[in-house]
Amino acid sequence: MDLLRTDRDLATQSYYAATAVPGGAWPALAGDADCDVAVVGGGLAGVSAALELAERGFSVRLLEAQTIGFGASGRNGGQAIHGLACDPATIEQQLGLDDARRVWAMSIEALDLIRERIRRHGIGCDWRDGWLGVATSARKARALLAWADRIERVYAYRLQPIAAADLRQWVASGRFHGGVHDPRSGHLHPLNYTLGLAHAAAAAGATLHERTPVLALQPGARVRLATAQGTVGARHVLLAGNVYLQGLAPQLAARIMPVGTYVGCTERLDAALADALIPSHAAVCDTNFVLDYFRTTADRRLLYGGRVSYSTVTPADLTQSMRRRMALTFPQLRDARIEYAWGGFVDITRNRAPDFGRLPATGDYAPNVYYLQGFSGHGLALAGLAGRLVAEAISGDAGRFDVFARLRHRPFPGGRRLRTPALVLGMAWYRLRDLLG
């Protein structure tokens, strides 16, 4: 399976690409260059790191194989949510409660950082406050409310409980049995946000290159990155390429898996209908393991995600598949036309915790190749903060970065040949659990 070719095909039908802010392309690398920090990958983590480092006075070169925001950063569901993809208990078990609280607090800082950057850099990306977590059965509703109660008691973060009888005031669907509301989380146009951060990084002094795949990495006191057009030498390197590093760091590849995730977006809806679907205009996500998520856009469409592929094979007839799935939640939209249907690949870890760290040193120099991966579909807010954490570490204060770096990650079982079939079988079990409630 040619992952990159499949992803290019999926990208062509994106609502975000069709509504992206025009203007802004960066030239490919031509010749050789040197800098303090080289960043590989032009998604949210990469452009955030470039911005933070440039503002600290470092010379920065960012190398993106495709275009800024090409991957998951520019094609996701647009939901910026508290916490991580894994439950806080996963962090507690590895790091203890004190550091788990630090991680949670950083996830909330990540939400505040989005608002700060939008305001400071004047980024037009349709930000809206509010997120709803909803449950598809009474049992799952009880579990969700119990979880929210613990989050308030242990992490001092309050989520407003919503009883089943009141939920129709929040979501015009009979599918759900209870929920919680978080006014601090929210949603936006992720591609426009990523592009806005890239422009801010360039304005701060970073040099950005698109259409510049990195072909080889030569470690050393000064790392050398080889491309088809030239080389870049740097004292520090950040690998922020998601599942697209193409063998650049083989020691990292076994700890993440590419998972296809898919989204449909309707035609423009009648204003009264669009407003009635989600009266608060919050983003919504259910609590299933294989979950559905949806929100209305600034131009009154319903954007609905809910298909995944653990085999990297795109579902057949994606547009109709997304339309049927959307109609299960909103029967009133059964005749609405799906105008856009697209997808992309996220990088998941086995425990769904993010995987941040440094490649082991070889020779007599300190580890100087950082990496950020494994956001597991929950990276819109966290990836932006992760770029700041790397900048802090390169500037000499690695305390916050190293909290995440202490998390342990195991490779997916089965090796190169069998790990994808094993994951497909495992996910079939989780789908069955969701269906059985």
Image (spheres, rainbow, N blue to C red):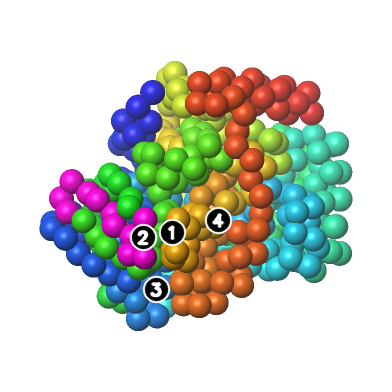
Question: Residue tagged by mark 3?
Answer: 53
Q: Is residue 195 above or below residue 144?
A: below
Spatial separation of the CA atoms under disc 2 and disc 3: 21 Å
Q: Quadrant of residue 340?
A: top left
Residue 363, numbered label: 1
Residue at 60% x, 33% y is: 412
Q: Secondary structure at mark 1?
A: loop
Three-letter code, disc 2: Gly
**On the picture, is 132 further left or further right than 57?**
right
Earlier residue among tags 2 and 3: 3
For the residues labelled 1 and 4, say whether their Cβ atoms are less than 8 Å apart. no
Spatial separation of the CA atoms under disc 1 and disc 4: 22 Å
Question: Residue tagged by mark 4?
Answer: 356
For the residues labelled 1 and 2, say whether their Cβ atoms are less than 8 Å apart. yes
List x then y, in percent, for residue 211.
Answer: 22, 48
Earlier residue among tags 2 and 4: 2
